[in-house]
Amino acid sequence: MEIPFYKMQGCGNDFIIFDNRRYGFTMAQLSTLAKQICRQRVSLGGDALMVVDEARATGDFRMIFFNADGSEAEMCGNGARCLARYAYEEGIAGPVMTIETLAGLVPAWREDQRTYRVRLNEPTKYTANLDFSKEELVEELLEDALEEKTAKSGSATVDQAIETIGQSLSQRAQGISFLDYVELGDPGLPHLVVGYPQLAETALADLKPLAQALRNWSALPKGANVNFVAVASVPDSEIVTADLASEASPDLVKPAGRAIVRTYERGVEDFTLACGTGAGSVAYSLVQRELVQTGAPVVLDVLGGQLAVAVRGKQLDLIGPTNVVAKGLLVDEDVQF
């Protein structure tokens, strides 16, 4: 068996994509396949496996998305942009299309050869200023982290873990300026938006213990993707890169504002180069807080480049570049169901 695939990336999120309508793999098989072929060095490597499948409602096709660990995700904004380009280039859909996802219908547009826009699922839940004191938050996060640490490491290392984790969480939690919770779609994709003014000066390795603890915070039953954000202010002429400022997106010339974003993702369990739904959640939170303007896109500097999100009420449009890295054949030596 040989499976034609695309390897694509959008702002550093990399995906393996193929048309499952030709093969009819089950969800269990796709989960297993994701764990196998997303491995680095021994296979294709990627953040996720994403496939086109038959539409079940009014969409042009259905998007099925599995993280590298085999867990299914409701929706991925950067993935949807890449999948839209795949669908257009493979003749599955036209330049305007509707993608079915677990979180709802996602309209998508081809803006130029590499730039694609998708309308993210609307916010279905928004909680501003989650009630917390930094001291109580650290104490609760420490309890959660220690439960996980004890389960993995055994009691011999608990005392050392308490001291190490406690010091790190206490130090980094002092930098939090606000905590907002956003869910996109139904069922909601959970995102925690963490105001962190010193983000640009903080190494990700130093921030990681706090990110891990917040991702598993017991106050959030679903867990959450954790998005740290710092609002920036620079001249418009310095905001938009060539990749983002396509001729089809003149509204990006004068964006509503700019922010630095770093996202720790569920499923990947680490900081990633970009997260589309995280970008949407951050932009929505910043607009609600009146830290940026509504209407014109907010430009977000992520590790993998730049994304833009236009917020109009609950309508969130994610705009950004897509790149085809490779096209090839996945052979059955690497497929073991």
Image: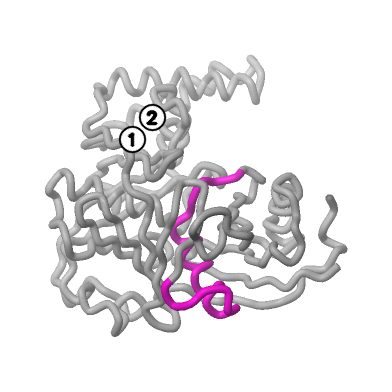
Identify the secondary structure beneath mark 1: helix
Q: How is the image coloured?
A: one colour
Q: 195 or 324: which is nearer to us?
A: 324
Packing grade of label 2 (10 A; few <14, some 14-19, many >=20) is many
- In magenta, the rendered stretch is 72-96
Q: Which residue is mark 2?
A: 169
Packing grade of label 1 (10 A; few <14, some 14-19, many >=20) is some
- Residue 198 left/right relative to 26: left
Identify the secondary structure beneath mark 2: helix
Check contact, mark 1 vs mark 2: CB within 8 A. yes
Residue 87 drawn above or below residue 312: below
- Residue 23 left/right relative to 272: right
Q: Residue furthest front?
A: 58
Location of residue 131 (image quadrant)? top left
Residue located 33% across and 53% down the image: 280
Q: Position of residue 90 (x, y in %)?
A: 60, 78
Residue 67 drawn above or below residue 51: above
Location of residue 130 (image quadrant)? top left
Q: Position of residue 246 (x, y in %)?
A: 32, 81
- 73 in magenta: yes
Location of residue 214 (image quadrant)? top left
Residue type pointed to by label 2: Leu
Residue type pointed to by label 1: Arg
Q: Position of residue 192 (x, y in %)?
A: 35, 38
Q: Which residue is mark 1?
A: 172
Q: Quadrant of the N terminus?
A: bottom right
Number of numbered tags placed on the structure image: 2
Residue located 16% across and 66% down the image: 234
Residue located 23% across and 36% down the image: 178
- Residue 301 left/right relative to 166: left
Q: Position of residue 328 (x, y in %)?
A: 72, 76
Q: 66 or 120: which is nearer to us?
A: 120
